[in-house]
Image: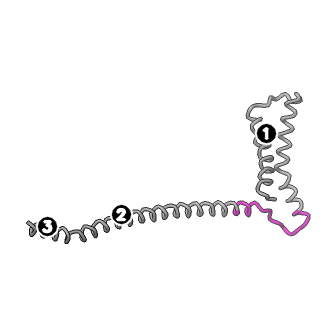
Amino acid sequence: MLTIFSAIIGFVGGLAPELIKYFNAKGDRKQELAIMDRQIEAQKQSASMHLQEVNIQADVSDSAAVYKASETKLTGYKWLDGLIEGYNSGVRPSITYGVLALYISDKFGVTTNKYTEFDESVLMLVLGYWFGQRAAKFAFGRK
């Protein structure tokens, strides 16, 4: 009986280190998979951040191109450059004053034409642009 018991203990004792190695390897593989999942997630976030960076850079370069295209081309003649600058700086305010004058003349009954909802929306668009531009200059510190 002792012989059979010793044989069973010897057999199980020989399997114990292999079982321990098996369970350790299984835990190691599970940990490696978790690490790989985290690396994949980090790569996805890195790619997403890079894409956002590229989009922001494209927006900045588009804005720079628009500003560069809208710059006044100087001719070298002071009187002509002054005339061009005066014209360019007066177009939008002139349109604003004209729209505002039409609105005021309608409110005081000077004109016979009725001011429609569309006309009012144009006035609000113009005024919103000017006051929105002023607020943006204040908020972002631009000239």
Which numbered disc, 1 or 3, marks the residue that appears first in the sequence?
3
Name the mark nearer the viewer: 1 or 3.
3
Q: Going 74% across and 32% down the picture, which residue do you hit? A: 117
The amino acid pointed to by label 2 is: Lys
User: Does residue 108 appear to the left or right of 27 in the view shown?
Assistant: right
Quadrant where the C terminus is found in the figure: bottom right
- Numbered label attached to residue 30: 2
Q: Report the residue marked by disc 3.
A: 8
Element on which disc 1 rests: helix
Q: Report the residue marked by disc 1.
A: 123
* Residue that protrudes farthest toward the right in the picture: 79
- In the image, is residue 76 part of the stretch drawn in magenta? yes
Q: Going 60% across and 60% down the picture, which residue do you hit? A: 55
Indicate how the structure is coloured in the image.
one colour
Q: Which residues are magenta?
A: 64-81
Element on which disc 2 rests: helix
The amino acid pointed to by label 3 is: Ile
Neighbourhood count class around disc 3 (C-alpha, 10 Å): few under 14, some 14–19, many 20 upward: few
| Distance CA(mark 1)–CA(mark 2) | 66 Å
The amino acid pointed to by label 1 is: Leu
Which numbered disc, 1 or 2, marks the residue that appears first in the sequence?
2
Q: How many marks?
A: 3
Q: Which residue occupies the foreground of this view, 105 or 16?
A: 16
